[in-house]
Amino acid sequence: MTTTAEQPGFSTGQQAREIDAVVVGAGFAGLYMLYRLRGLGLSVQVYEAGDGVGGTWYWNRYPGARVDVKSMYYNYSFDPELEQEWEWTEKLPPQPELLRYINHVADRFDLRKDVQLRTRVTAAIYDESAARWQITTDRGEVVSARFAIMATGCLSAPKMVEVPGIDTFRGRSFHTGNWPGREVDFSGRRVAVIGTGSSGVQVIPLVAEAAGELTVFQRTANYVLPAGNHALDPEFQRDIKSRYREVRKANRESSFGIARPEATKGALEVSEDQRNAFYRKVWEDKDSELVSMLTGFTDTLTDEAANETAAQFIRDRIAEIVKDPAVAELLQPTGLFGVKRPVLGTDYYETFNRPNVRLVDVSATPLTAITESGLETTQESFEFDDIIYATGYDAMTGALDAVDIRGRGGASLRTKWADGPVTYLGLAVAGFPNLFTITGPGSPAVLSNMMVSIEQHVDWVADAIEVMRSKGVTTMEAEGAAEQAWTRHVGEAGDMTLYPKVDSWYVGSNVPGKPRVMYAYIGGVGAFREKCDQVAADDYEGFTLTR
Ligand code: N01
């Protein structure tokens, strides 16, 4: 909209590049934020570093990349026609289909005209006298916006290995989270994959099929459950579409953003046979969810002995699949199940039966260097044509830390978060008025179906901006006490579970020097939504609104 004096607190539209809102990132979050803000009549500029929209599904173009939440639940719910007209083809859609979907959304709602691609936001500086954000890009542009909305993604700042020599390697190097947009041919080549998280588990079987030799460098074995992916049954798709409102509501009110039958008993309250029958059903059922194994009993995520029953069931399956007992043993995780991100795989363990695949345990013999011709561990030198880094992300805070964000008094967000992120509801930060983080640290985000969390956060922010406008409010800012209390609550909720007991990116331990705290809120998307709605209903309790 062209902002006018009748709408107090908004730009007058007289200065070039004075706009209402900047949105950083054009993934699922950024595009929906644009859609909502445009619906309110705001002038919006979206900046996106990639040369296409899609966020995660633009960058993760590696072979085998696919989402591990069912297609029917991993899509936008905001437009009833969109959700009816789009036909999903698989239970777990592959990256190209997801990218087609998000491009379809961009075209269908004419979103591209406000998205500037190939542009990275480098700084966001708050100008207190004007109550506006000065946003600078790597193209040297500066815009002034009333609102700065960071839709930068939770897993979008790739992390490399911490050994010297990465730039010296003369072969081809890839990071799964920054994969080229062309097909990469591995036929007959000697390939290394470092990392066995979700990305490694997806890429390894497909590279193994093509490569001459594949060497997998594993530091921590992962619990990998069968994905059970299959072509989507048209009847199932029709059924969900016929009752989508009810399905969406149930997902929104659930814990993980995927409605599940409520568990009533602990794993140790039933007999071993009953327990194992449940685990086997989940393992074999092609309609299982990523969270099925976690949600069958009340205590899998809170009680070590209960957790161990699921862990042992999976170890036993690994031993059945992998023929070489020494390799099987290396692939069997020893830690807790499910509190490091659970992983779905297709033919993952079977891949280690192939004659061209070797597993190297880099917990026993750590990587020491990347060399011109390959890499070295404490025990051996390896030569490769290609190295694939499936080494993950500086999660939750990495993409925000990459921007120089300065609030009141020039205070830096990086400095404020030096001991771990402090936010109110993962949405806002004291000292940073009118800056919102979509699925920011301290929100359920990565501990949920991301689509449910993204839509909830975007809707909350858009609704708040609408209320501000109707009441003539210029700035909305989290109060220090509210964010301290919320951040404490996020930590305490984590402490009631087994999550903090395990090294993982959920607690920041994958990045050397990163503060060890709980980066996401485990209280569940249903409870979190209620809290956010309550805050709004109570005149934005915990926020200071300035006229
Ligand atoms: O990253 P990760 P990812 N030396 O951090 C290893 C989402 N996702 O990209 O476990 C040796 O999980 C590291 O070892 P360790 C999903 O939320 C979803 O796989 O730290 N190894 C680990 O094995 C997921 O959780 C989908 O000991 C090193 C691996 O690299 C998140 O993204 C698909 C090392 C990193 O695993 C991140 O997944 C893909 C070193 N120096 C991703 N540094 C789906 O929807 C790291 N490692 C299916």
Image: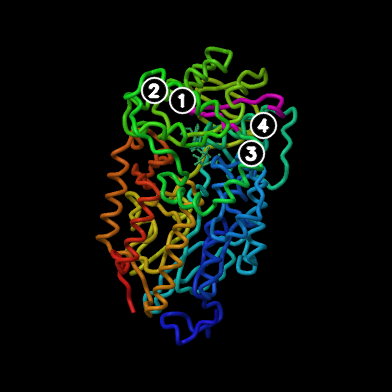
Disc on the earlier residue, 2 or 3:
3
Q: Which mark is residue 309?
A: 2
- Decide if residue 22 is on the left or right side of residue 297: right
Q: Amino acid at mark 4?
A: Leu
In the depicted structure, whether residue 402 falls above or below residue 479 = above
- Front of the two marks 2 and 1: 1
> What percent of the width, then of the height, locates residue 152?
50, 56
Disc on the earlier residue, 2 or 4:
4
Q: Which mark is residue 249?
A: none
Q: Amino acid at mark 3?
A: Ser
- Front of the two marks 3 and 1: 1
Provide the secondary structure element on which disc 3 rests.
Answer: strand
Between marks 3 and 4, how big is the CA–CA gap?
17 Å
Q: Residue at x 37, y 24 (%)?
A: 308
- Front of the two marks 2 and 4: 2
Disc on the earlier residue, 3 or 4:
3
Question: Callout 3: 10 Å neighbours few (<14), some, many (20+)?
Answer: some
For residue 211: magenta?
yes
Question: Callout 1: 10 Å neighbours few (<14), some, many (20+)?
Answer: many
Q: Amino acid at mark 1?
A: Tyr
Instruction: Pick the quarter of the image with the C terminus.
Output: bottom left
Residue at numbered disc 1: 279
